[in-house]
Amino acid sequence: MRLWRWALALFIFVAFVAWLEHMIGWRRLLMPWLSLSLPDLLAALGLMLLTYGLRALRIYDYFSPALQGQFIATLRLTLLHNFFNNLLPMRTGEAAFPVLMRRYFDVPVSRSVPSLLWLRVLDLHVLLTFGWSALSQRYLPDALGGPLLALWLLVPAAMFFARAWLGARLAGRDGRFATLARTLLAGLPERPALFWRAWFWTGVNWAVKLAVMVFIFTRFDPLPWLVTLPGVVGGELGSVLPVHGVAGVGTYEAGVMAGLAPQGVALKAALVAAVNLHLFILGATVLGAGLARLLPKPVPREPVATD
């Protein structure tokens, strides 16, 4: 990554931490943790770790048969990838995925990178689906919100079944968008069953993860879940999209506030809850990485031919 991007990410980190100390004070920011019960915290951590397992299951299934019989190693890879992705700035942590896939399972970069791009598109689609569902229930009539949501849900399937047509239209075209689109199409699974399973596991994973994050947020700021959900989705979009600071500090909170501000919430209380939700996510990330170090590395074996 270019030096100026690291400098920008570090500047955002330091500036945001200093601004929080000036505006609220870290002592006041962290005080709400004293009111969070230990059973609630442990339950939330357990469910967050479950989402890492669901993510590993999606990868294990998507890259079968190259990962066959090595789910524990896949979980280790997922936890480490999540650690690097959440802590390194500007999406540089994504590079850990193809590196680990090559090292652990001998999956070539030419397969892992396009597949990861497609899985990220599914993540983005499901995230926006949950956010849209919450907002449409509050601001749109059912006669309009329902059909728009149904059309949006068809987008991944349309891309999958129109891949040949899209590929023909992109053939021979130059430019960053055309190259990115061809890479995305190369990551699509060959079999419809695998497409539907990847979409299913993506939906289940995000349903659990968003529910946990809404639960934690409302322990610090008791807003209705329909109000909280767009804010949580906004914070996660700060992690999925390319702009991403060191450990997401500043950018994650900005995403949460962007999802909450139009709904007329008390911004200072929401900011305190957003910061503490982010601390919870980072804590779960570090815990997951620690558990990954305890898991065995993959058993060496002969490379398996992949689709």
Image: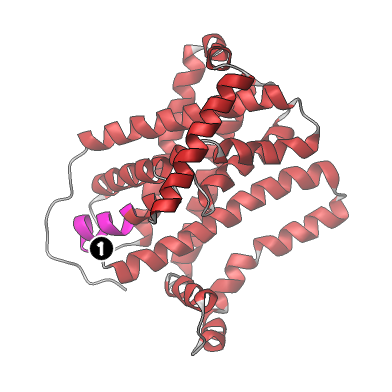
> Most extreme residue toward the top, as rendered?
34
Residue drawn at (45%, 33%) of the image: 48
Residue drawn at (55%, 11%) of the image: 31
Residue drawn at (48%, 46%) of the image: 8
Q: Nearer the viewer, residue 241 or 37?
A: 241
User: For residue 25, which quarter of the picture?
Assistant: top right
Q: Nearer the viewer, residue 306 or 76?
A: 76
Residue 159 lies, in percent from the top left, at 57, 72
Colour setting? secondary structure
One can see residue 248 in this view: no
How many residues crowd around disc 1 within 10 Å: few (fewer than 14), some, or many (20 or more)?
Answer: some
Relative horizontal placement of residue 50, taking residue 121 as reference (left or right): left
Residue 30 lies, in percent from the top left, at 53, 15
Q: How many marks?
A: 1
Task: Please give the range of residues in magenta.
Answer: 96-106
Residue 113 lies, in percent from the top left, at 37, 65
Relative horizontal placement of residue 103, taking residue 16 as reference (left or right): left
Relative horizontal placement of residue 48, taking residue 157 as reference (left or right): left
* Rendered position, 188 above or below 269: below
* Rendered position, 1 above or below 270: below
Residue behind mark 1: 66
Quarter holding the C terminus is bottom left
Residue 1 lies, in percent from the top left, at 38, 56
* Rendered position, 252 above or below 93: above
Mark 1: which amino acid?
A: Ala
Magenta run includes residue 101: yes
Q: Nearer the viewer, residue 146 or 1?
A: 1
Residue drawn at (58%, 66%) of the image: 156
